[in-house]
Amino acid sequence: MGSAFVIEGLGGEKKLTGSIPVYGSKNAVLPLMAAAVLVEGETKLSNVPGIADIRSMITILEGLGAYVTYTGDSVSLRTQDLTQTVLDRAAAKSLRASVLLTGPVLARNKSVTFPHPGGDLIGERPVDVFLNAFVKLGATVIENADSYTVSAPNGLSGGEYFFHVVSVTGTESVLIAATAATGPVVLKNCAMEPEVVATADFLISCGAKIEGAGTPTMLITPAPLHAPDAPTKIIPDRIEAASFLTLGALLGRDITVTGAERAHLDAVIDALEIMGVTVTVDSAGMHVRAPEKLLGARLRTHEYPGYPTDAQSPQVVLLTQASGESVVIESIFDGRLAYTKELVRMGAHIELVSPHRAVIRGPTPLSAATIDTPDIRAGLAYMLAAAIAQGTSTINNAHIIDRGYAHIDARLAALGLSIKRVES
Ligand code: EPU
């Protein structure tokens, strides 16, 4: 059922060479698709990655009444007839990022009904910051058995809201909604991720008045939004870039990561340098190779500009190959170290001291395994582990990895890795 990746491990040999391109960012395109709900005219997006999450988002938008086309790497959206207020239940449950739509749909249609997001394998993912923000801006919330209906018959009011936890999609959804409020909105303790800044930049290109994007405090003065004539190019995926740099540090004779944005990768490059990895940047891209010896390190995930939680799992695979003791603290999600048990099965020495803290002792050779992947990022980590291991590994649930990384098998094969996609 479904497909799997079969990977012939290199048994520790460091021989991958060539270039690997970084595609457009999944987590930047999804909020722009949500923002289109409030944009008049045709929203055109380019450099859109070919991944299943985009299709799921389209299904939900179409269910609400949007017209969407998705050809090659371009998506265009027209929302003039978007009158529905109920998010398609199955699609919304399968895609956590569907919560991005709650703010825009509420602001546009004065009401939104959405299911509680499905149990996620990376930990608890509540929606309280969304609901509290909407209430603060004058909405009322009715909680049903497994869904929420939020209403603001007179539209969202202006006001001030403090995010009690820093939330990326929370910040994005409320930011988008605030552009259509009846008065100025101040948002405090906002997420500062590049995807938030890209969302604000897009809204500004549509006529929004937003100050402070990329800082903890944003001021939004409502204004009507019109689509710009030119397509908006999605920013490069910094998590892909981080994962590929880690791959280069593990297995590269000489790897060039192309199309990445260096400015988004400070924490990632710093973490690699601490381990003894050199990353050089020139006009061709970011060059990385596996060093003679990797040094153990302490890694703590953090909101941007700290180390991204989405890049933690590939980096843990790298740490299994480093000398001495490393400590990894996962500060964002409480279930996001659980995947390490499969790395232990492959031979890694990893002790989960708590759900948030792993102690790794290395270096340890890894042996091949058959593994089911729980989420996108753990899946990529298992692919890296399989690539360094001795023997042939099978990573099941390829479709989960496909949600975050388009054509990942072809991109890795181009570097010299023996990888096949098979029906399992
Ligand atoms: N949180 C709450 N209440 C809320 C919302 C979040 O307590 O209402 C908590 C979460 O439980 C978590 C923390 O806040 O502990 C941060 O979660 P956040 O809301 O920032 O996560 P998200 O917006 O749901 C986005 C990315 C994730 C990425 C996180 C953290 C998108 C579509 N998703 O999720 O990406 O891990 O930010 O950077 O942007 C992935 O791409 O694989 C992925 C999971």
Image (spheres, grey):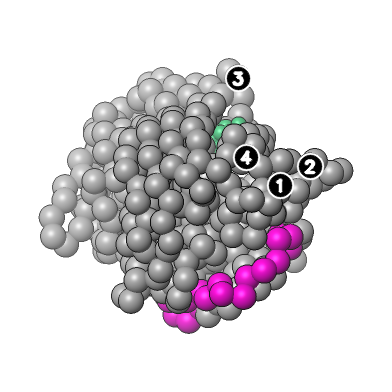
Residue, x 63% and y 70% (percent of image)? 82
Q: Nearer the viewer, mark 4 or mark 2?
A: 4
Q: Main secondary structure of the magenta part?
A: loop
The image quarter in which residue 140 lies: top right
Magenta residues?
70-88
Mark closer to the chain start, 1 or 4: 4
First-in-chain label (1 vs 2): 2
Judge by depth and name the residue closer to the eye, 26 or 221. Answer: 221
Nearer the observer: mark 2 or 3; the answer is: 2
Q: Is residue 82 magenta?
A: yes
Residue labelled 2 has its Cβ within 8 Å of some atom of ligand 1: no
Disc 4 and disc 3: Cα gap in Å? 40 Å
- Crowding near the residue tagged with mark 3, few <14, some 14–19, many ≥20 C-alpha atoms within 10 Å: few
Q: Secondary structure at mark 1?
A: strand
Seen from this angle, which residue lies furthest left? 282
How far is disc 1 from disc 4 in space, using C-alphas? 10 Å
Q: Position of residue 164 (x, y in %)?
A: 54, 26
Mark 4 highlights which residue?
138
The front one of 270 and 384 is 270
Q: What is the CA distance from the residue labelled 2 to the residue labelled 3? A: 36 Å
Q: Ligand 1 sits in which quadrant? A: top right
For disc 3, the marked residue is 354
Q: Residue at x 38, y 38 (%)?
A: 218
Mark 4: give few (<14), some (14-19) or many (20+) Cα within 10 Å. some
Contact (Cβ within 8 Å) of mark 2 with mark 3: no
Horizontal relation, residue 305 to residue 136: left or right = left
- Can residue 291 be seen in the rendering of this structure? yes
Which residue in the structure is indicated by mark 2?
Answer: 142
Dot label at residue 320: none
CA distance separating discs 1 and 2:
6 Å
For discs 1 and 3, the disc positioned in front in the rendered view: 1
Circle 1: residue type: Val
